[in-house]
Amino acid sequence: MATKLEDTLNKLLVADNAVIQEGTKELGELLKTPGVVGELCKVMGTSTAPQVRQYAAVILRKRLGKSRHWIKLEPNVKDGIKEGVLQALMREPESSVRNAIAQFVGVIARHELSAGNWPALLQFIQQMVQSQNIQERQLGVYVVSVVSSVAGDQLLPHLHHLLHLFSATLEDTTSPAAFHTIQALTNFAPLVGQENMNEFQALLPKVLVAIKALLSQDEDQAAESMELFDVLAECEVALLVPHLRPVIQLCLDISGDKNLGETVRVKAITFLGYITRLKKKYILKNKLVVPLVSAMFNVACSESEDDSCLGFFGGEEGEGGNPVHAAAQTLDACALHLPPDKLLPCLMAQVEPALKSGNPHQVKGAYLALAMVAEGCADTLRHKHLHPLLQCICHGITSENQLVRNSALFALGQFAEHLQPDISKYHADLLPVLFDYLTQICVLVGKGGSDPPGVDRMFYALEVFCENLEGELLPHLPALMERLFAVLAAPTSVHMKELAISAIGATANAAKEHMSPYFQQIVEMLKGYLTVDQADETMSLQVQSLDTLGQLARCMGVENFLVYAPDCVSLGLGLMERKDDPDVRKTCYLLFASLASVMKGEMAVHLPKIMDRMMLSLRSTDGVVTHFKDDEGGLPTTIEGLSDSEEEEEGEVDLLGNEETEDEDVAGYSVENAFLEEKEDTCVALRELSLHCGDAFLPYMDKSGEEVYKMLNYPNEDVRQAAVNAMAQFVISLSKSSAPEAAEGFKKWIQVFIPKLSELIRTDEERSVVMACLEAYAEVLKEVGAPVLVPQGHLEAIINCVRDVMEKKTMCQDMADEAGSEDEGEAEHDEMLIEYAGEVVPSLGKAMTQDAFATQFAQLLPLFANKTKTSCSIAERSFSLGTLAESVEALGTVSGKFVPQLLPLFQQGAYDEDDEVRSNAIYGLGVLGQHGGEAILSHYHAILGVLSAALSKESFPRALDNICGAVARLITANPGNVPLEQVFPVVLGCLPLREDFEENSTVFECFLKLYQGQYPILAQNLVPVLRLAALVYSTKQADDKTNKLIQELVSSASRDFSEQFNSLVQSLEPEIVARLQAALAAAAPATSPTPS
């Protein structure tokens, strides 16, 4: 039979499909015969053809890899296989076959070692590893590396002895023995217990020496060996810490060595980013920020084959790309995880000379570095560096050098995205520069030819900047739309048209209803891509047109878009039926969500089809890619087909046991980006459908909840974040519905959602997900109120989450990173996380009775008070004082018991050097004065003194507004405790408000209180008060509450002081008079005389 089997295997190795099919069929039959395992072993050990021997070993590994197949063999057969495979391994001269046999040894070891049934293997390993013969020593270590990859647990009892042997083999750097030793150590790293920790750590210096030797011998092996550092950092960082500095130094050296290949450099650079995220306090304590930033900056400035597109635009975090791309990602990690006061000085010391150097690559590196730190260091850049950096960027955009121009445009786009709202103030300087560039592009594309260089960067900067401008874009709107239409009308490429259509959508987000003059022209242009099926090369235009159509629906308003909405729904449904494409589906879902904001409940008729398709998208496993270990040496994959189609004699499906879930051939799984984005955008769209469709969405709520809830555990953080937001809206929508089934639905989902958020906050490793969970707590508490806290344990879960984040006890807050101390500062995004936790507290207060909240607030107050110290960052001081002030509002009359703790904090904050901190502290003084009751009365004089001192030197608009609001609150609460003759005229002189228009209701409530109390000071100042009322009424400065207060004040004044009122009307501008008349007409009852 062995001869027959060998002949059959030979047929599978010829380049003839007919012969291969014949051999496949024969092999399927042979594998059903008794004794085939022994015959395969014979072929593996005796065939003269190396590929046949290798193929036999692979089939044996696959067939016996599952324990149920191994268990069926007779004991004597098992013993024969174990003895024969080690002999075959010893005799085998070909490395590829030896590797396949070693893999087979590994699966047998997995079955046998745990029961102590294969002592010969351990003796074999020891004999080989200690052999003086270099090839035997190499084979022994290789067997350990293979067995540890599939049966590491079974080798653990022998790890102490193996580590002793590894000490010698790591020194064997002239053969692959050292490399295989490092592979084995990598496999053992997640399994190491306390008893072997010291021995394992002692090997790391030798590992570093071995990797340095591999760099000159085999860079790929060196890169693979560095995987040990990643595994240690992820699983057993304590093993790595004693040797972390030399590991980091090695990676820094590799990063900067231009003689090395890209693979190993990218590996080193990526590790530096990862360890910065994981052990930021170690980086700070060991003063590694400067060498790390310097090394990454130098890489960013290096020449790259990918410099035409900079190699980072749109790149994903993680390994891949080139060293410039990897260095950019590591700088991003530095900005996200290191305190800006430690990062930015050393970065700016590199950036400034580079910008002045005149070397395009140096300048490119400077702009790239600035772009990558924009998100993580946003607050510091906005407050301290924005103006000079924007000047530099504008200079770069106008450069004649394409590389410089592209990188400057990318930096501007990143700044526009992350440095809002401050950067929008520079629109008058920046937009003309971008428009000039766009005009040049229009001229170039009008002449035909390929896309000009840098168009991606230009449109990216333009789109992000315009999208965030809102009303400030309007003066520039005609010029912008003229240029975008010109690009679309010219004979431009598909990509250029796609960029222009996207830019129109971004412009609509800012201009909103002011896009109406261009609406018909846009719709006609989009129709060409939406109503005709597109070829593959123009498919992107259809997808982008759908996206822009959705943005128009959202921005144009119901009155402008409602007539088009039903046709748009039909269009989207038709496209999804014709195109099985994740990009089309996700864009259609977002279009439906946008249309729901226009159609509301009228979406009901379309929801059955829409929801069926969306549920399929959430359940789908499309796009999941299985990555297999590459150890077959290019052998044919025929055996995989056999395992799916044949049956054994006993009727069991799957010859080789591949039906079981574990498979040692699988290296891992990934999901293609388009399918990830489809799941994320499905969650986003479901959230909006739930928000806008009202009770029309109720029939789909439960099924949507079940599918979205599963996404809370999805491996991708963007999907988890979108799922959190969707679930939050589901419970809010259920709580607001009066339908009986909604009450049951709310009760069901609130009981699972609140605990799940608690679990995610404590255990999720991604800050963005934890922030979304905290935001969900705040939003659900704010919108739903007390019912959130009815189920047992919910209050404790929420309070404990806030406390855990404040005390940095959650998984995403570097729990393992114990080195360093508080005074080293926090990254801005770590501070943001704590800020999100703070925002939960006032929302929680408003969902509870004041007395119940006071009990919880007493426990949380010290945590927030601790963040108001002058040694804390600006962001920490600002949000802590803001949280405390908003909590006072929630406490209401009970806040008096906290006056001793809160008043000093607010008083100190009112003198802070930072504008926002002062503003929040002054607001706190006002609400404490308003709600503090008897406890605060004796402090009125001191509070007024603080406010007076602040007013005398304050220039920040929001702080000035909050001073006015604070005084108004004090007067409203206790007018007799305020020297009105001195205070009121001063406050009146600071009006109208400049920025914080929410305080207008506070101001006019104060005026009305004084009026109704017949205080002379109000009558003496009636004319300026009414003038102010006319200026504010029915403008963007007044909300509904303010308008009602003004109506009552104007109505009363016109009735009680008709002469003064009529005199005032005569002196006012017609527009202001019209507002007064409108306020008077809206007042009820309308008994006052009408001004002429």
Image: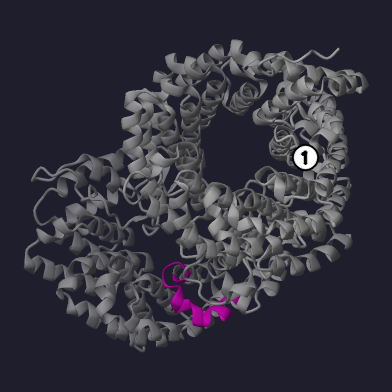
Q: In the figure, is residue 757 to the left or right of 303?
A: left
The N terminus, quarter of image:
bottom left
Report the amino acid beneath label 1.
Met
* Residue 490, visible in the rendered structure: no
Q: In the figure, is residue 871 to the left or right of 591?
A: right
Give the extent of the magenta segment: 232-248
Q: In the figure, is residue 34 to the left or right of 529?
A: left
Figure colour scheme: one colour
**Residue in the image at 27% along x and 75% along y:** 155
SS assignment at label 1: helix
Find residue 108 and report its horizontal and vertical position in percent.
21, 66
Rendered view: 123 above or below 73: below
Q: Nearer the viewer, residue 847 or 531?
A: 847
Extreme residue in the right direction:
1067
**Residue in the image at 41% along x and 46% along y:** 714
**Residue in the image at 74% along x and 42% along y:** 457
The C terminus, quarter of image:
top right
Extreme residue in the top direction:
563
**Residue in the image at 86% along x and 55% along y:** 952
Rendered view: 284 above or below 951: below
Residue receiving disc 1: 458
